[in-house]
Image (cartoon, helix red, strand yellow):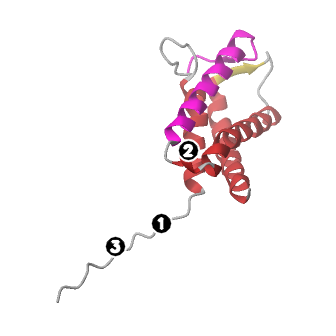
Amino acid sequence: MKRMAVIFFFAFVLNFVWENLHSLLYENYMGRPITEFILLRATLADAVMIAAVAFPFLYFSGLRAHRWIAILLWIILAVVIELFALSTGRWAYNEYMPLVPFLGVGLTPTIQLALLGYLSLRLTERPTSQVPSEPPEHP
C-alpha cells in the first residue's frame, strides 16, 4: 500500500501543476470563474482516479506487462468525464482549447489522466541495474 500512497502523491502533484496550467483553456466552471479551490478539488479527483486505475496494475502480476490497458482506461475515463461535463454545462472551453476531432472534447483534458497516470507509475518504479553482466571466461 506504500506504493499506492506514492502514486497518489505523484499524481496529486503532477495534476496540481497541470490543472493550474491548463485552466487557462477554460471559460468557466458552472458559469463562474475558476478558483484555486475548484482546481484543488479537480486535482484531488484526478489523483484518486489515477490511483484507482493503477491499483490492479501494481498488485496483479499478470497486468504489470499490460500497462497500455491502464493508459486506455485513463483516456476513456477522461473522454467520458469531458463529454458529461460539456453536455451538462459543468465547464466550457475557451477558443484556445485544442479539440479532439470527431469527439469535440479538449485535447489537454483527454491526455491528462493517461499521461500523468503513466508518469506516476513510472516515477514509483524501482530503478533496475544498468550494469551489464560480465561475459563468461574462456579457458
Q: Which of marks 2 and 1 is nearer the N terminus?
A: 2
- Horizontally, is 113 left or right of 47 in the view? left
Contact between marks 3 and 1 (CB within 8 A): the answer is no
Mark nearer the viewer, 2 or 1: 2
In-front residue for pair 71/100: 71
Q: Mark 3 points at which residue?
A: 132
Cα distance between the residues tagged 2 and 3:
27 Å
Q: Which residue lies furthest to the bottom in this view?
A: 139
Q: In this view, does 79 lie above or below 46?
A: above
Residue drawn at the location 65% of the way across and 20% of the way down: 80
Q: Earlier in the sequence, mark 2 or mark 3?
A: 2
Quadrant of res 70: top right
Which residue was labeled with disc 1?
A: 128
Element type at mark 3: loop
- Above/below status of 86 relative to 68: above
Left or right placement of residue 10 versus residue 31 in this view = left
Residue range highlighted in magenta: 67-96
Q: Residue furthest left?
A: 139
Label 2: few (<14), some (14–19) or many (≥20) C-alpha neighbours in 10 Å = some
Name the dominant secondary structure of the magenta segment: helix
Occupied quadrant, residue 18: top right
Report x, y in % for residue 4: 70, 52
Viewer-proximal residue among 30 and 95: 30
- The residue nearer to you, when weighing 62 against 19, is 62
Question: Which structural element holds mark 2?
Answer: helix
Which label belongs to residue 63?
2
Where 21 sits versus 101, above or below?
below
Report crowding for label 1: few under 14, some 14 to 19, many 20 or more residues within 10 A (C-alpha): few
Disc assigned to residue 8: none
**Residue 125 drawn at (x, y percent):** 56, 58
Question: Of the residues shown, which amino acid type is indicated by label 2?
Answer: Leu
Please name the residue shown 75% across and 11% down the image.
88
